[in-house]
Image (spheres, rainbow, N blue to C red):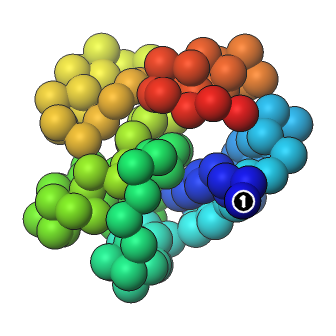
Amino acid sequence: MEYIYRFIVIDDNPINVLVSENIIQKVSKNAQIKSFALAPLALQHIEEEYSRIDSSKPTLLFLDLHMPVMDGFEFLERFMKLDPDIQKQFKIIVLSATADNTELKKAIAYPCVTDYREKPLTIKVLKKLIEENAFSI
């Protein structure tokens, strides 16, 4: 059985979502991509779907920091309260339009955050992230 690689994109900007989705599809033809404009909807999906599965292969989650309703930092706070069996299934990469050093330090202080990258996501960056996070496409 062929493994389906999972990705989640959380970003309120539809252009950024489209760019990320296109990059992921170019790198991984069998990618399963879920995108959310609102972080609370992403959290709900994660709680519902990932409590039923337990995969040894991580889901790469790309997170924007600046969003309405719930920003990326609030998402991270709530994510850290999820069941550890759900948390372990994710590698979170913060994607931000600003390379603010304070934000960088704050984001990578979360144990669930694997990396911090500037937008937009590129093929080169995605391939490196996949390699670093034990994916094999």
Q: Position of residue 90 (x, y in %)?
A: 38, 49
Quadrant position of residue 97: top right
Between 1 and 78, the one lying in front of the other is 1
Image quadrant holding the N terminus, namely bottom right
Residue drawn at the location 71% of the way across and 33% of the way down? 137
Q: Position of residue 131 (x, y in %)?
A: 56, 20
134 relative to 32, above or below: above
Q: Left or right: where does residue 37 sit relative to residue 122?
A: left
Residue drawn at the location 27% of the way across and 51% of the way down? 88
Determine whether the residue tagged by mark 1 lies in a helix, strand or loop.
loop
Q: How many marks?
A: 1
Q: Left or right: where does residue 70 sit relative to residue 2?
A: left
Between 136 and 80, the one lying in front of the other is 136
Residue 126: tell me if it is visible: yes
Bin the neighbour count of mark 1 within 10 Å (Cα to Cα): few under 14, some 14-19, many 20 and up.
few
**Would you name the residue on which mark 1 appears?**
1
Q: Mark 1 belongs to which amino acid?
A: Met
Q: Left or right: where does residue 20 sit relative to residue 62?
A: right
Between 16 and 113, the one lying in front of the other is 113
15 relative to 34, above or below: above
Residue 11: tell me if it is visible: no
Residue drawn at the location 44% of the way across and 79% of the way down? 49
Q: Residue furthest front?
A: 1
